Amino acid sequence: MAMAPAGGIRPGSKGSVAMTIAAILKNKPNNVVLVAPKDELRTVVQGLARQKVGVALVMEGDRMIGIISERDVMRVLAANGPAVLETAVECHMISEVRTCTPATTVDEATAMMNAGRFRHLPVIDEARLLGVISIRDLLNAKVAKQATDVNSLCGYVAGAYTRS
């Protein structure tokens, strides 16, 4: 996939401009929770609460080997009780992690999340973790783009009908 221009947009279909993940990451704090596979599940809960995010990435050195969400934690907690918080993250993580790049468009990332039925997507560039985007980030980007489009159209219409 080609790299996005510095502005975080790339040509879309039919001459439109597609916002990319690079644009979202520019305005997003880097509050990614990283845990080790042998860490207790309790560590995930504490990290998610501290950073106010919904997912933790499971890392072995610099390599991401899994992901675990607050929903995953709640599911195993409901099924096994509080003692499960003392078990290793690797027992509960999802190993097959879908990722995107900074050049991925908002629409492409949304389609990936919808198809996979997940809410968080790590952003990787040349094997380097850049951050995590959420479905909320994508929704906010789409709403902002719609507002910009509406304002542009209103300006065009107002300008087209004003008399000098």
Image (cartoon, grey):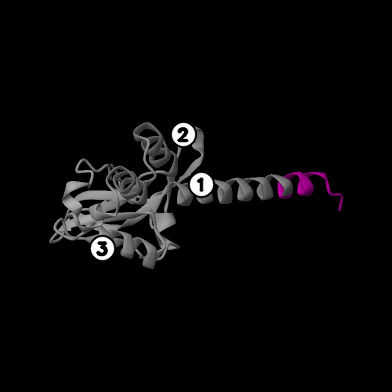
- How many other residues sit within 10 Å of disc 1, few (<14), some (14-19) or many (≥20)? few
Does the image show residue 10? yes
Say whether residue 72 is left or right of residue 107: left
- Give the number of the disc on residue 43: 3
Q: Mark 1 touching mark 3, by CB under 8 A?
A: no
- Give the number of the disc on residue 73: none
Q: Which residue is drawn at 30% across and 42% down?
A: 79
Majority secondary structure in the magenta region: helix
Please state, as top left, top right, bottom left or bottom right, where the N terminus lies in the image.
top left
> Which tag is nearer the camera, tag 1 or tag 3?
3
Say whether residue 134 is left or right of residue 44: right
Using the rendered view, name the quadrant where residue 37 is placed.
Answer: bottom left
Element on which disc 3 rests: helix
Queried whether the magenta region covers residue 163, the answer comes back as yes
Amino acid residing under circle 1: Leu
* Residue 28 image point, x, y percent: 43, 62
- Give the number of the disc on residue 13: 2
> Sequence-wise, which precedes: disc 2 or disc 3?
2
Residue carrying label 1: 139
> Sequence-wise, which precedes: disc 1 or disc 3?
3
> Sequence-wise, which precedes: disc 2 or disc 1?
2
Amino acid residing under circle 3: Thr
Does the image show residue 101? no
- Residue range corresponding to the magenta coloring: 155-164
Say whether residue 164 is left or right of residue 153: right
Element on which disc 2 rests: helix
* Residue 120 image point, x, y percent: 36, 48
Queried whether the magenta region covers residue 55, the answer comes back as no
- How many other residues sit within 10 Å of disc 2, few (<14), some (14-19) or many (≥20)? few
Q: Which residue is drawn at 29% across and 49% down?
A: 81
Q: Distance between the residues labelled 2 and 3?
A: 44 Å
Element on which disc 1 rests: helix
